[in-house]
Amino acid sequence: MNDLASKWIADRSALPGMIGCGVSEPGGNCLCQSANELICPSGKLEQILHQIVGAKTRLAADGVSPLWQTWVFAHGKIRSATRPDGWIMVAVVNEEPAGAKTLDTLTTEFLALAPGN
Amino acid sequence: MNNQAQHQVLFVDDDGDFLKTVGDLFGTLSGGSWQIHLAPTTDRALEILKEVSVDLVVVDIKMPVLDGVQFVGMLQRRYPKMKRAMLTAFADEEKRTASLASGADLFIEKPRTPDGLKSVFAMLGELLQWESRDGFQGVLRRVGLSDVIQMECLARNSSILEIYNQHVIGRVYIEDGQLIHAAGGDLTGEQALQKLLSLPGGSFELAQFEAPPKQTLSGPWEFLLMEAARVRDEMAANGAAAGLEVDPQTLSAPADTSASRLEETLICFSSGELLYEAQCADVAARAGWLQSVVDQAGQLGGILPLGNFERLELALPGGRAVALARGGRLVFVRVSHTLGDA
């Protein structure tokens, strides 16, 4: 994982409503940052990231290729976004409105980021 | 017996600690205007109800023998004028819908903090102040307008949902289970519906159906409610950032210059049996995909306990799609943006 991606993700864990986030590079390596290891250990974030990558593959097989997708649950949301170069971001926030705003901020930043460079 | 008490309030919960807490705290907060009765079982509650004319009963959903939903249903039949509220430690859409369908006037998540208990006290106090009217009444807090609209549509009822605070500020017309018109302030149609469903508070009442002055809504009610939910989430996010809120008096909000065109709709049972379809190229494939979404949501929920799955939102090139599973039915709606939206 390069420095830019590592620094970007490390700086995002304190955003409002954030539970945790992670990025996966095209080769499969990933880096996850939990905002609270007790609530959401980084290991679980990695599991979610792998699950999302699998879901993305199945979506693509059905002809659905979203720019981003949000899994909305009663007590939180999981957003994943995919860049054209294959990098994938996953963020988990709580159900508060500030969490939804955080998702949009993160997505915009991630899609504009150049982590592969 | 407290001679100053204006209201008789009965709490039914098998959690003795919780009963003691609300008994002490709500007694203090009410300044003696509530006579509070505590019942650790539904049997004991029925005994109290025989002795006292109770104004409000507050029931925990999870009760042994006869659960809270069944109990409230029975109370509605035996004591139709008594107000009923339900409490649960873990609120979700399924419990909320079941509670409202059983006759609860209010559905509240059990608070975990002293401030939360004070909020519950305020909500119950508000419920006690309701005047009896013909028809259905509610308060827009935990009991959402969407819940009422869903129940009316599923029952294929015809009614007018009037939303008001001191004055009527909006109306939603439902005919034979279909949303046909919404109006509020200067808005009509989907914009009015979305703004009304985004209101942070207020009251509503179901009135007898009359034909609206015009028809401004069409299409499946599931789609209209889902789109309203999406807009509400976006407004909440944007409002939190920019200090924007809907004015409940006028429903004024920044003009929305975007428009959407419905591209594909599918509603089916979990078994795949088709209920409704429009412009869906491959119904079986889409139904299979919806089921896989539900499976994946279950797997994600198994990793992190985020509560019940509500929906999957997809941002697609030039549009959006929403998939949801509710009440044994799967729904997929895809729209394209046609104006003013990047």
Image: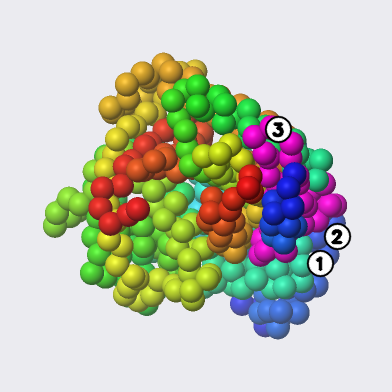
Q: Are marks 3 and 2 in contact (CB under 8 Å)?
A: no
Residue B264 versus residue B12: which sits nearer the camera? B264
Residue drawn at x 54%, y 42% is A83
Identity, as a three-letter code, of the amino acid under mark 3: Gly
Above or below, B118 against A112 in this view is below
Please report, as a chain letter, where disc 2 is located: B
> How many angstroms separate mark 2 from mark 1 (CA)?
6 Å
Residue A40 image point, x, y percent: 79, 48
Residue stretch in magenta: A13-41
> How many angstroms separate mark 1 from mark 3 (CA)?
52 Å
**According to the image, label 3 marks what residue?**
A28
Please state, as top left, top right, bottom left or bottom right, where the N terminus of chain B lies in the image: bottom right
Residue B232 image point, x, y percent: 45, 58
Residue B77 visible in the current orientation: no
Left/right of residue B327 with respect to residue B58 in the rendered view: left
Would residue B321 be counted in the magenta stretch?
no
Residue B308 visible in the current orientation: yes
**According to the image, label 1 marks what residue?**
B21
Q: Nearer the viewer, mark 1 or mark 3?
A: 3
Identity, as a three-letter code, of the amino acid under mark 2: Asp
> How many angstroms separate mark 3 from mark 2 (CA)?
51 Å
Above or below, A30 against A61 in this view is below
Residue B134 versus residue A15: which sits nearer the camera? A15
Tag 3 secondary structure = loop
Left/right of residue B245 with respect to residue A27 in the rendered view: left
Tag 1 secondary structure = helix
Q: Are marks 2 and 1 in contact (CB under 8 Å)?
A: yes
Identity, as a three-letter code, of the amino acid under mark 1: Thr
The number of discs equals: 3
Above or below, B331 against A74 in this view is above
Please report, as a chain letter, where disc 3 is located: A
**According to the image, label 2 marks what residue?**
B17
